[in-house]
Amino acid sequence: MMTLHRPEGTLRHDGDPILLTPEDAGWTYAGLRVLRIGGGESRIVRTGEFEAFVLPLAGACTVRVDGATFTLAGRDSVFARVTDFAYVPRDAEVRLTAEGVDLEVALPMARCTKRLEPRYGPAEQAPVEVRGAGRATRQVTNFGIPGVWEHADKLNACELITPDGNWSSYPPHKHDSAGACEVVNEEIYYFRIAGRDGITPSREGFGLHRTYTADGTVEENVAVRDGDVFLIPRGYHGPCVAAPGYPMYYLNVLAGPAPERSMAFCDDPAHSWVRARWDSEPLDPRCPVTSHEGRTGCD
């Protein structure tokens, strides 16, 4: 039975946590790498047909590409602060050096045709949005989306933090048919689940994720744990539910064939009414969880 769920370890490659190419996913554009580099060590990454963001998950790094050098301050954990990042183009040789401690770094990527210049993305310029209300309150860090970061050909990316016990990616929505309110996108969810301290990722905790289609040809309801990946080639996706005691993070990577980047979507009409109820519900005071300065103190 085919599954869209890729548990932690199933995408491991040469000691790195994740190597997911479009071919691995069965589609054309979106991919993801997650690398681990020892403190003080360097790695060469050749981007080939892909543009990418260099997004520290834990640790700091120096990025050298096309004669440019960017020093990324990074963070201790995805639950600790909003990070700075770099954009690197296709057909590039990128040297990544872990500064000080060991580095864990994500490279969300998209197959593209245009070759743009490398560029630095300051953490303080990444908008942090509080979305939803009540138990559907969550944080969205829109660091690499259209309207915020225009320096990309096909690649879109954002980060979400869902406080423990809350729901996100709700109402369920889809990006799988071109029309007035949506655009075709392949999408990757990369999950990190915090342990008991709410900051350090741990395999102890879990969350839940659902993806489905209206005709029932796709129906997956899975428990996700730290390091898991979920593929969304089509269909409604959501909710993502953070189990009580275990905050949930996920990195969204989207790319598709449209000539202009877009993250437009349509809600499942059966559940879109929920949005109107948020107008009368209070926000969860735990959000935002992080900013570029660190934790907000609303634990």
Image: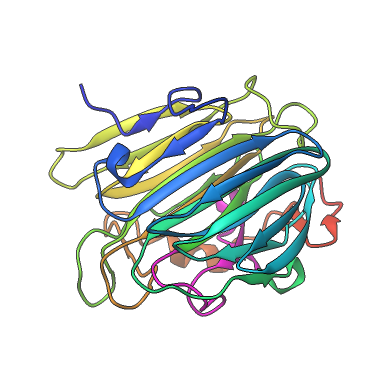
Q: Nearer the viewer, residue 245 or 175?
A: 175
Q: Nearer the viewer, residue 78 or 273?
A: 78
Confirm whether the magenta stretch covers residue 290.
no
* Residue 30 appears in view: yes
Q: In the image, is 115 to the left or to the right of 42? A: left
Can you give x and y, in whole percent of width and height, for residue 25 in the image? 30, 40
Q: In the image, is 120 to the left or to the right of 270? A: right
Residue in view at x 75 percent, y 42 percent: 77
Q: Which of the 4 image quadrants contains residue 70?
A: bottom right
First to last magenta residue range: 127-155
Residue 203 drawn above or below residue 101: above
> So how many labels did they put on this image?
0
Confirm whether the magenta stretch covers residue 144.
yes
Residue in view at x 31 percent, y 37 percent: 24
Q: Nearer the viewer, residue 17 or 116?
A: 116
Which color scheme did the rendering employ for the protein? rainbow
Q: Quadrant of the C terminus?
A: top right
Q: Quadrant of the N terminus?
A: top left
Can you give x and y, in whole percent of width and height, for residue 218 in the image? 21, 38
Residue in view at x 76 percent, y 26 percent: 196
Residue 204 drawn above or below residue 260: above
* Residue 280 appears in view: no
Q: Nearer the viewer, residue 275 or 299?
A: 299
Residue 126 drawn above or below residue 136: below
Residue 111 drawn above or below residue 7: below
Residue in view at x 40 percent, y 29 percent: 6
Can you give x and y, in whole percent of width and height, for residue 216 in the image? 16, 39
Can you give x and y, in whole percent of width and height, for residue 254 in the image? 40, 58
Q: In the image, is 268 to the left or to the right of 169? A: left
